[in-house]
Amino acid sequence: MTHRALLIFALIFLGMFGLSPANAGDGVVNGVKYRPLPASPSLRVDPLDNSADNMVLKAEFEHLLRSDGFNVSDTATLVFSFEVRDEIGSWGEGDNRTVLELTSRGGKSGGENAKAKLNLFNSSDGALLNPGRGKSSLNMPTRYKIEATLDDRSNGKRLWQGWVTGDLGMTDTLTLKKNMVPYLSQVVGKTVTSKTIILP
């Protein structure tokens, strides 16, 4: 393959993959600390709705917050509230385009007549400038988001808020949400910006 063909291949590769967002993990966690937490804080965990799943998550939060040194009490004036939101995934046509074709023949190793063909447009199979007509594929997975706040009910001031997002993969929704809880509980009272997380 000539240097020119290698350059074309490299540019195509960078164009197709270099601009894609990093997919180092399955989710992201954020936290914003507004005010310092009191020493040995005592708090109450309140889901914004009492669905069966949320009651399971409530127990998970209480267990993990105790492990992190918080006192969990139903009479506490600091209230840790949370809710779960979802964003249903979408499907679209698959991308089966053929961008670069490499052929070679001749000589003992079959490389004397090497050719590189760059496909710019192909109405049926797709190419660099247009997508192919492939099978349906998942464009965006179903995503779940757990949002939480920590408020001081004695004076109405917010001490902290945070949220964690995760994409639904091969597991069920409750398992995904339970796996997201530890990442959010770890950043209570802290400021964390777009930390990538790996979900089991």
Image (spheres, rainbow, N blue to C red):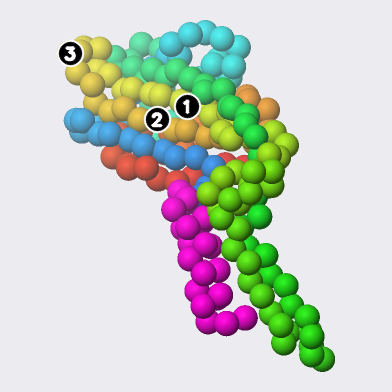
Comparing 78 with 178, the one in front is 178
Sort mark 3 into few (<14), some (14-19) or many (20+) by Cα contacts within 10 Å. Answer: few
Number of the label disc, if any, that sits on residue 163: 2
Kind of element beneath mark 3: loop
Mark 2 or mark 3, which is nearer to you?
2
Please name the amino acid that badge 1 sits on.
Answer: Lys
Please name the amino acid that badge 2 sits on.
Answer: Trp
Magenta stretch holds residue 59: no
Please name the residue that numbered disc 1 is placed on: 145
In magenta, the rendered stretch is 1-22
Q: Is residue 60 visible?
A: no
Please name the residue that numbered disc 3 is placed on: 155
Vertical relation: 94 (above or below) 147: below
First in sequence: mark 2 or mark 3?
3
Q: Position of residue 174 (x, y in %)?
A: 62, 24
Mark 3 or mark 1, which is nearer to you?
1
